[in-house]
DNA sequence: GGCACCCCATCTGTCGTGTA
DNA sequence: TACACGACAGATGGGGTGCC
């Protein structure tokens, strides 16, 4: 095949990120599974299956085909199987792949193909969180889940951004968070732009308590992680867990709080980590300029404009006036929450100290036993000489 | 010891979000 | 709207802990 032709795998591997490569591979595979009349039913496509699809793709772009009719068939196939957004994505990817292989469908034919499926639209109905619901959710969360939720609520950060935070990204003294990456594996945020946002007093307090406990958490997590893919202690992140862990933690807590409702069409939860971000935006907008809120949340259209017009001090001053809206507790309840967290922290510290004492005692006893064993063998040796 | 539950992890398929 | 990527759901596999 000529070097300017891209098979399925060459096409998908040319994408920048693993996520996009995965999605594109899925789309082109679906196209050939549809054409061959063999829809894939397994949980994941094997390497052997992918190679077969790759061979089919190679043959497909090397010979004349009825592309229009094949695309119409594919459009009908995806329309029966996926939500409007997803079906449009699959179709767009296949058309992109064909175009990259110099297979250009006329504008009219493309209109006919795209017109045969539903337009892009979101079908999951989001639940708008109330303050009471967030509090209820928080009460059922584990420790790490509470830290993630409170940071999200106070900063408006995406979950991936929270999980990408390093110690140097947070200025604890000034309550400023520098959002520099979207998770531990990526170097930038979703829109490739760094920004700042702020912590409430409450979030700062909870974060400090967490920092005191973080090493103990890592120690326990390493013991619990499996031997096939062990978790390591050298995870430098503030919140050293994966996205899916927090998702599980969030979902379990929602269920316990009686807040877990799934959309009947998509089976997706109507409250997600993104709901906290939406709460942040909607609440702060009632008390500070919308442009500032959007900039803190990292919405592209507002970032540069807001940061050009306002100093960090001005942004923080406005945020501080409105931050009670993105705090779990009302100001009068804060002392009680602090006292509760402090007693939890003291309990953790006493456990750690007791653990250390027992370890020292164990080591001392082991040394004593070794000494006794050494003495016994010396006595036995002396006796055997007699 | 068996079991249930919790927590840890990765992977794939699907749906949602946001920018250009 | 195309494109890129984040987020969610579910499968799978393993270890720790508490209860019976």
Image: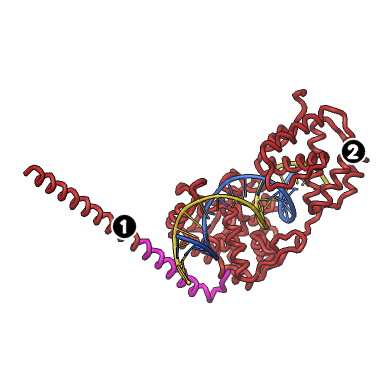
Chain colours: A red, B blue, C yellow
Residue occupying the point 77% across, 39% down: A28
C20 or A105: which is nearer to us?
Answer: C20
Residue extent of the magenta highlight: A328-352
Q: Are marks 1 and 2 on the same chain?
A: yes
Q: In the image, residue A371 lies at what x, y percent?
A: 19, 51
In the depicted structure, whether residue A304 falls above or below residue A313: above
In the picture as drawn, the residue positioned furthest to the bottom comes out as A332
At numbered mark 2, what does the secondary structure look like: helix, strand or loop? helix
Residue A168 in magenta? no
Magenta stretch, main secondary structure, is helix
A218 or A317: which is nearer to us?
Answer: A218
Per the image, the residue denoted by label 2 is A68
Find residue A356 and report its image quarter.
bottom left
In the picture, the quarter occupied by the C terminus of chain A is: top left
Q: In the image, residue A285 lies at what x, y percent?
A: 69, 64
Q: In the image, residue A349 lies at what x, y percent?
A: 38, 63
Per the image, the residue denoted by label 1 is A359
Residue occupying the point 15% across, 50% down: A375
């Amino acid at each position: 095949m000529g070097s300017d032709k891209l098979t399925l795998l060459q096409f998908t591997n040319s994408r920048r990120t693993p996520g996009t490569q995965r999605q594109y591979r899925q789309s082109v595979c679906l196209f050939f599974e549809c054409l061959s009349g063999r829809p894939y039913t397994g949980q994941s496509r094997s390497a052997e299956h992918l190679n077969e699809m790759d061979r089919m793709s190679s043959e497909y772009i090397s010979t004349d085909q009825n592309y229009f009719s094949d695309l119409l068939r594919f459009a009908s196939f995806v329309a029966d199987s996926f939500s409007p957004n997803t079906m449009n994505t699959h179709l767009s990817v296949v058309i992109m792949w064909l175009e990259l292989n110099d297979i250009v469908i006329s504008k009219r034919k493309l209109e006919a193909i795209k017109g045969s499926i539903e337009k892009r639209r979101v079908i999951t109905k989001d639940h708008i969180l109330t303050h009471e619901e967030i509090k209820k959710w928080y009460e059922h969360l584990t420790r790490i889940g509470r830290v993630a939720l409170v940071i999200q609520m106070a900063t408006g950060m995406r979950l991936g951004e929270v999980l990408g935070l390093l110690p140097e990204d947070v200025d604890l003294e000034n309550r400023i968070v520098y959002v520099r990456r979207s998770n531990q594996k990526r170097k930038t945020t979703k829109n490739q732009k760094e920004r700042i946002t702020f912590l409430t007093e409450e979030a700062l307090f909870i974060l400090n308590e967490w920092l005191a406990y973080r090493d103990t958490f890592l120690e326990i997590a390493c013991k619990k992680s499996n031997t096939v893919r062990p978790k390591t202690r050298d995870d430098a992140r503030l919140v050293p867990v994966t996205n899916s862990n927090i998702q599980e933690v969030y979902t379990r807590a929602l269920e316990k709080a009686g807040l877990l409702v799934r959309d009947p069409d998509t089976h997706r939860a109507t409250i997600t980590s993104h709901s906290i971000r939406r709460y942040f935006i909607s609440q702060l907008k009632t008390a500070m300029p919308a442009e500032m809120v959007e900039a803190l949340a990292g919405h592209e259209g507002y970032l540069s404009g807001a940061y050009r017009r306002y100093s960090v001090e001005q942004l923080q001053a406005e945020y501080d006036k409105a931050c009670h809206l993105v705090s779990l507790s009302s100001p009068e309840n804060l002392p009680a929450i602090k006292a509760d967290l402090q007693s939890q922290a003291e309990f953790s510290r006493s456990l750690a100290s007791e653990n250390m004492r027992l370890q020292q005692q164990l080591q001392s006893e082991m040394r004593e036993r070794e000494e006794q064993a050494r003495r016994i063998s010396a006595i036995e040796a002396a006796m055997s000489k007699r």
